């Protein structure tokens, strides 16, 4: 799916999101990561693949944000998250269990955000506990060179 690239203007959240939506993205962070990957000469597909997974008692569908082809040809699935809701966390655990060979990673707006007001657990801590690599804002250079 071809997407247009825009500047990395990180103005007001609503302005960035509106601009991202107008350009075919679901969030400003997705648009920002796509622009970064493009500037690095990295090949990627945005929401092109659908993975079917089973939620107890029902079949569900997960569409990864990015299938990234690294400089060595390895495929990394990258999920961008500003907010990481309970349903998202549950879904990712199920997907990882049902697709153990996939390399699923997260790029968060802020990995130090707590998963809820009542919790001391951050997005980063959750990823570490469940074995998901993560980063802030963009994919680390090390990932792209794998």
Image: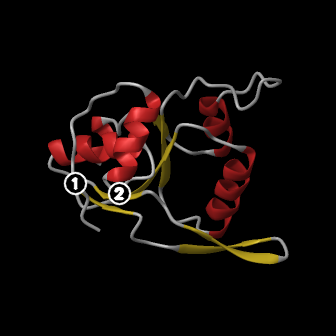
Q: Is residue 145 visible?
A: no
Which residue position holds label 2? 24
Q: Is residue 140 left or right of residue 38?
A: right
- Residue at 68 percent of width and 26 percent of height: 114
**Could you say whether the residue bearing mark 2 is in a helix, strand or loop?**
loop
Mark 1, Cα crowd under 10 Å, few <14 / some 14-19 / many 20+, is few
Residue 120: x and y in percent read 76, 21
Q: Is residue 118 visible?
A: yes
Mark 2, Cα crowd under 10 Å, few <14 / some 14-19 / many 20+, is some
The picture quadrant where one finds residue 72 is bottom left
Disc on res. 114: none
- Residue at 47 percent of width and 57 percent of height: 103
User: Quarter holding the N terminus?
Assistant: bottom left
Residue 74: x and y in percent read 31, 60
- Residue at 35 percent of width and 36 percent of height: 138
Callout count: 2
- Residue at 35 percent of width and 40 percent of height: 139
Q: Nearer the viewer, residue 69 or 8?
A: 8
Which residue position holds label 1? 4
Q: Is residue 92 left or right of residue 13?
A: right
How is the structure coloured here? Answer: secondary structure
Spatial CA distance of label 2 from label 1 is: 8 Å
Q: Is residue 4 left or right of residue 30?
A: left
Residue 40: x and y in percent read 17, 43
111 shown above or below 36? above
3 shown above or below 16? below
Q: Earlier in the sequence, mark 2 or mark 1?
A: 1
């Amino acid at each position: 799916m071809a997407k247009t690239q825009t500047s990395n203007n990180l103005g007001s959240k609503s302005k960035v999101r509106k601009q991202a939506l107008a350009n075919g993205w679901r969030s400003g962070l997705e648009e920002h990561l796509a622009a970064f990957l493009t500037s690095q000469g990295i090949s990627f597909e945005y929401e092109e693949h659908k993975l079917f997974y089973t939620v107890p008692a029902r079949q569900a569908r997960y569409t990864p944000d990015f299938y990234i082809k690294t400089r060595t040809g390895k495929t990394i699935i990258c999920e961008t998250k500003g907010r990481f809701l309970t349903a998202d966390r549950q879904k990712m655990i199920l997907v990882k269990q049902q697709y153990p060979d996939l390399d699923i990673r997260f790029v968060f707006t802020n990995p130090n955000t707590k998963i809820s007001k009542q919790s001391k657990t951050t997005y980063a801590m959750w990823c570490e506990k469940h074995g998901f690599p993560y980063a802030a804002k963009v994919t680390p250079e090390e990932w792209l060179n794998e």
